Image (tube, grey):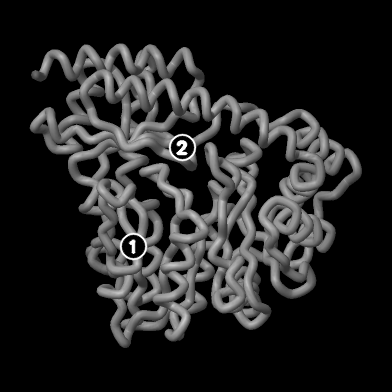
Amino acid sequence: MIIKDKINKVITDMKPSGIRKFFDLVAQMPEAISLGVGEPDFVTPWHIRDAGIYSLEKGHTYYTSNSGLASLREEICNYLDRRFNLKYNYKNEVLVTVGGSEAIDLTIRALISNGDEVLIPQPSFVCYVPCVQMAGGVPVPIVTKEEDNFKLTPEALKKAITPKTKLLVLPYPNNPTGAIMTYDELKAIVDVLKDTDIFVMSDEIYAELTYGTKHRSIAEFPEMRDRTILVSGFSKAYAMTGWRLGYVCAHPDIIAPLTKIHQYAIMSSPTVSQYAALEAVKKGDNDIDAMVSEYNYRRKVIFEAFNQIGLECFEPLGAFYVFPSIKSTGMKSNDFCENLLKEQKVAVVPGDAFGESGEGYIRCSYAYSIEAINRALDRIDKFVSSHK
């Protein structure tokens, strides 16, 4: 028997993550500087860690309910109301998940049947397309353009809709571009969707990380509230990546099937992480504000530096990434990244890892110390100068 021939063809044909490729290479190069991984360099705030430690001391090492601690779900609802004016019922409209990634997977598996089309604005996070493919759906990329500030336009959305369209992924604030959507821009999207039966999965994991403008959600619109699935989590806003905790909020008729899948695949999210997250949503607003202030400083430094280096860069207003164009170098994104790592020991991610429309760009994270960012920028400057 040839084992590899027996593996699910969808999985064998699936490309590995372009982000992890460079992360693995850097792990073998201790002298390298990485701007590649979207992970906060902050340690989880002490009071949040302490809540997790205390939960262990109290012996809270059992399973929680499938949906998550009721107290956590209630505080998530209070938090969303307080920070974004979004109202959900903790009893039947919230599910606590293993990171935002599980919430994305659950949503797609619950909604998508064979042949259903899922609209995915790109460049965007790497997991949407594989999750759609594993569910038997058809991913339909919608190219967003730098001249539109990498925003989804109503014209592009309207053009992509077919009778088979089931779901629109709305990935804002955006990874990798840092683009955001304003209330008026979302309203234009709502006007396209309101007379359809299309669901929206709004990935709002970076909702707290905006600069100069407050995040707005498509779930704010009454006509969209019941068919919007809001995905978020604790990794980015609270520097809790390793705790692996997220959540999804939606109409009860959507939460019920998501919970069913979660029940069989996961059982419940980590108990200690839930107690830590409870502390985060209750008392972590000041932590968020402090981290956002620091990210904003780094954002300005790296954005201005890339333009000075000669790599034209769109100004990001959300998340913690810049997405400079490397077209002026004449190199493909993957070649640029491989050569940069080889010659200057700096790791960034090729733009085509986030969809074909990302070709000609690179993603750099500024979720690193300002010292590391400045050292990396110096090396990138030398690299670009040597290839003129």
Q: Position of residue 9 (x, y in %)?
A: 26, 68
- Residue kind at label 1, given as amino acid type: Thr
Q: Residue at x 35, y 68 (%)?
A: 154
User: In the drawing, does residue 51 fall left or right of residue 42?
Assistant: right
Residue at 42% x, 42% y is 178
Point out residue 21 in the picture as x, y percentages from the top left corner: 31, 39
- One can see residue 145 in this view: yes
**Label of residue 153 in the image:** 1
Distance between the Cα atoms at labels 2 and 1? Answer: 26 Å
Residue sitting nearer the eye, 115 or 210:
210
- In the image, what residue type sits under mark 2? Gly
Q: Secondary structure at mark 2?
A: loop
Up/down of 6 relative to 49, above or below: below
Residue 301 appears in which quarter of the rendering? top left
Q: Which mark is residue 103?
A: none
Q: Residue at (61%, 47%) from the top-left corner?
A: 244
Residue under label 2: 38
Give percent across and percent down for residue 147: 25, 48
